[in-house]
């Protein structure tokens, strides 16, 4: 398999929208037409409850890990990193859902844990603390993924830094409306359900 074929495969894996599928199974709905309109785990959690949200999070994380595993098996760590970026792109902008996907946090967690578990766990820990303290999923996600490249830089070096920077940039871009609401004080907390 050529590298470009692996990246295409990773993008296609990302197109498998667990949140969309869970919405159909648990609520017989298109999750993109409810709540925030986002095909992601937080919107599923708020719309359909904890069990559905957990399945969505698990599925989206798993597809990130699968793409990295295949990429690493075929071409080593560099291809694994590129595959990780490609699977997140596929999740965020899936062609099968007219490029309306999630924000890539759960998938990035699966990717990060597969690339370098220690770095990912440090960032997840910081994110969990932020979530516990402030109750904003978006703030916790942005903080954790924004920290990732810098943890990579300290523990692994420049190549990992650039990989982490790509994941962080996508997360921040996809959360730009959340950032605006955070600044305005109108962002919903984790405990607030969709109405």
Image (tube, rainbow, N blue to C red):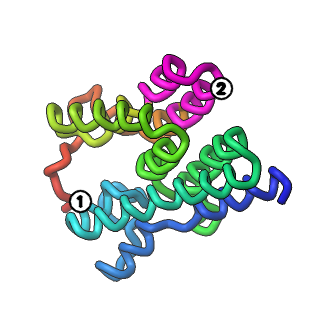
Q: Residue at x 37, y 32 (%)?
A: 123
Q: Position of residue 136 (x, y in %)?
A: 23, 39
Count neighbours of disc 2 (C-alpha within 10 A) and say few if under 14, some if 14 to 19, many if 20 or more. some
Q: Which sits in the foreground, 18 or 92?
A: 18
Q: Can you identify the residue that label 2 sits on?
A: 159
Callout 1–callout 2 Cβ contact below 8 Å: no
Q: Residue at x 46, y 29 (%)?
A: 148
Q: Residue at x 44, y 46 (%)?
A: 109
The N terminus sits in image quarter: bottom right
Q: Can you identify the residue that label 1 sits on?
A: 46
Identify the image quadrant of residue 52. bottom left
Q: Is residue 154 above or below residue 44?
A: above
Q: Is residue 67 above or below residue 187?
A: below
Q: State whether the magenta stretch is mostly helix, strand or loop.
A: helix
Farthest residue toward the right? 2
Magenta stretch bounds = 146-168
Relative to 90, 123 lies left or right = left
Identify the image quadrant of residue 44. bottom left
Q: Tag count in the figure? A: 2
Q: Which sits in the foreground, 94 or 79?
A: 79
Q: Secondary structure at mark 1?
A: helix
Q: Residue at x 37, y 37 (%)?
A: 121
86 in magenta? no
Picture disc at residue 16 = none
Q: Which sits in the foreground, 148 or 12?
A: 148
Count neighbours of disc 1 (C-alpha within 10 A) and say few if under 14, some if 14 to 19, many if 20 or more. many
Q: Position of residue 137 (x, y in %)?
A: 27, 42
Q: Mark 1 to mark 2: distance in Å?
A: 37 Å
Q: Position of residue 16 (x, y in %)?
A: 55, 67
Relative to 135, 183 lies left or right = right
Relative to 52, 120 lies left or right = right
């Amino acid at each position: 398999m050529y590298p470009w074929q692996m990246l295409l495969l990773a993008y296609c894996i990302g197109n498998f929208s667990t949140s969309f599928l869970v919405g159909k199974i648990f609520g017989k709905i298109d999750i993109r037409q409810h709540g925030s309109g986002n095909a992601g785990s937080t919107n599923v959690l708020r719309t359909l409850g904890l069990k559905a949200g957990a399945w969505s999070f698990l599925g989206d994380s798993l597809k990130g890990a699968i793409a990295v595993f295949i990429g690493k098996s075929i071409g080593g760590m560099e291809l694994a990193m590129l595959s990780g970026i490609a699977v997140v792109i596929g999740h965020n902008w899936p062609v099968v859902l007219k490029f309306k996907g999630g924000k890539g946090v759960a998938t990035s967690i699966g990717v990060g844990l597969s690339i370098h578990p220690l770095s990912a766990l440090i960032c997840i820990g910081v994110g969990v603390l932020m979530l516990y303290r402030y109750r904003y999923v978006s703030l916790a996600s942005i903080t954790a993924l924004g920290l990732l490249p810098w943890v990579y830089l300290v523990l692994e070096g420049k190549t990992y830094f650039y990989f982490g920077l790509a994941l962080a940039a996508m997360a921040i871009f996809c959360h730009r409306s959340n950032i605006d609401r955070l600044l305005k004080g109108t962002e919903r907390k984790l405990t607030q359900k969709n109405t």
